[in-house]
Amino acid sequence: MCGIVGYTGPRPVAATLFHGLRRLEYRGYDSAGLGIQEDGGIRVIKRRGNLDHLEPLLGDLPGEGGTGIAHTRWATHGVPSTENAHPHLDCRGRIAVVHNGIIENYQELERGLTSRGHRFRSRTDTEVLVHLVEENYRGDLLEAVRAAMPKIRGTYAAVFLSADEPGVLVGARKDSPLLLGLGEGENFLASATLAFLDFTRRAVSLENGDLVRVTDDDWVILDINGGSVERKVFEVPFDATAVQKGGYSDFMLKEIHEQPQAWMDTLRGRMSPGNRLRIEELEEDRFDLREINRIIFVSCGTSYHASLLGRYVMEGWMDIPVEVDISSEFYYRAPKLDPRCLVVAVSQSGETADTMSAVRWAKRCGAPTLAVVNVVGSMMARESDGVLYTHAGPEIGVAATKTFLAQVAAVYLLGLYLGQERGLLEPEFVRHTLRELEDLTGRIEEVLGDTDTVERCADKYCRCEDFLFLGRNINYPLAMEAALKLKEISYIHAEGYPAGEMKHGPIALLHPGFPVVALIPRDSVYEKMKGNVEEVRARQAPVIAVATQGDAEIRSCCEEVIYVPEVKPQYYPVVMAPALQLFAYHVAKMRGCNVDQPRNLAKTVTVE
Ligand code: F6R
């Protein structure tokens, strides 16, 4: 959700903070602001809108080193406006805060603070934080934050600044990410490592309940009782070049083209010298895979679609049931779990609040948890019993693309590994399948190298306002993912449906201006899919087929055909996904949309 940056050190402070905000802009972009220590006070500039609106105001800020905080917002409480933008100041303008999260009891706190003479300037939940700290401030910011935080119910990553303590930043964290970036003679606090990656790769992930005091050459972490806390320093596993556009017009396009690499990197190095599939992360004996008798995936959005896809392959390779739940619904279902049920959380960010809640529910029930995540050291990775990383590298475009394919690679791997460990799959089968998966890298490259038809289809249909994506079997989750991609970046209404279900309702929607994208590769349900395509055609709706290279027959019953290379049936989603992502991308570009930062969306959803 919101992005936070704090900096103290010799670099030009305003420019360094703004640079960090640019890197975090994918987290929120409805308003932004900076607060900097200056002439014994705190200077705040903030603006409604994205960073381009803030940038012109930077000109008269100090060009020298110093200490400050900055924020890019994704509104939860209070409309996007300049008043509601962060930082927020206390009554005297001596303390400032930036915050990511939700303060659940803010109304109650605000009433109390108002009755004690505090005046509020915004309609946000965040502002209570700075007034509470003001009330507890006796010349030591860390102590004031420590006294204030126990009064808060909700989630927060917050960074404070006091005009009376030059060079000092204080951070606090509960259920929203906050990291310390450790430089030489300078330090950072941020929501994600990307904010400081151009300056340092050494970082510390703060844990729930941690408070941190940071100066340019020192940092100390305390718990809420004032006891000192040790946290591990780690090295960010990529450098700043990974978060640049590298010649592409948008991050999304770059990330779509990085898929062969993401796919390969997630599969790479998994074969042991003894010719067994190894997932080292799962060999730490925190749970015994042979004891597992049920698997439940929990995830949201694109990660949910990757999980659904995983179910199709895993059930074929294993003797135990696999269920898939949307994280935000899992909790209400309150499923009965026990130590033999493995809960697998799939998440790009590893910070999604709904999925985190599902993981915590599983832990409370005594079920083992496994996180399939992309962000190293993220909360889900730390709190789960095991972690399987997708090696997609940083993803900046808000719409997930390369991390989807990397998640698909990870769930294939997981299925193979579980099948092997449970003695159900022969070593030769596992080895052969892994090689087949690796070989798909070349097929993904082929799809990305030939995009003329995709672009032509985008051009032909980009003015339509509704789309239906149909798939069967393993291609049904992909139909949902393709619809999600199109709607989130182009704002076109799109639905992904199981093709067999169309006649039970959605067929009523069809008309000549309502294109249907049919995922119809040469597989066991080909003839059934063809029947569905005929049903669509009978309603005069245009059909774009995504079909197997060489399938001439399909041409006669569709307006357009996007061909993908022939692969085994269970691998078609892997080669069709990039084509469908590119279709959504080109449609959105032709409609003039900002594909990297679609309206109303944030990359990491840290609120429930
Ligand atoms: C869609 C998209 C979202 C995320 C969802 C879960 O393109 O990016 O639907 O997939 O918010 O996020 P993670 O995977 O970080 O848990």
Image (spheres, rainbow, N blue to C red):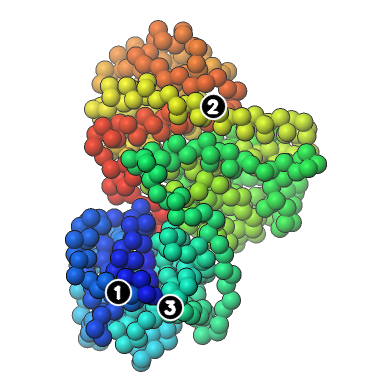
Q: Are marks 3 and 1 in contact (CB under 8 Å)?
A: no
What is the crowding at mark 1: few (fewer than 14 residues within 10 Å), some, or many (at least 20)? few
Disc 3 on helix, strand or loop? loop
Q: Amino acid at mark 1?
A: Glu
Residue 263 lies, with reference to residue 3, above or below; the image says above
Q: Residues within 10 Å of mark 3 (few under 14, many from 20)?
A: many
Where does residue 335 sit, x and y in percent of width and height?
57, 51
User: Which residue is located at x 51 percent, y 30 percent?
Assistant: 444
Q: CA distance from mark 3 to mark 1?
A: 14 Å
Mark 1–mark 2 contact, CB under 8 Å?
no
Q: Nearer the viewer, residue 429 or 131?
A: 429
Q: Say left or right for 504 vs 270.
A: left
**What residue is pinned by disc 1?**
64
Secondary-structure class at tag 2 = helix
At label 2, which amino acid type do we have?
Arg
Q: Mark 3 vs mark 2: which is more N-terminal? A: 3
**Residue projecting furthest to the right:** 274
Question: For this rendering, which residue is in front, 100 or 353?
Answer: 100
Quick check: 357 left or right of 112? right
Tell me the quarter of the picture where residue 523 sits.
top right
Q: Say which mark, if any, is on residue 377.
A: none
Left or right: where 410 falls relative to 35: right
Residue topped by disc 3: 216
In front of the other: label 3 or label 1? 1
Q: CA distance from mark 1 to mark 2?
A: 51 Å
Q: Position of residue 164 (x, y in %)?
A: 31, 87
Q: Which mark is residue 443?
A: 2
Label 1 secondary element: loop
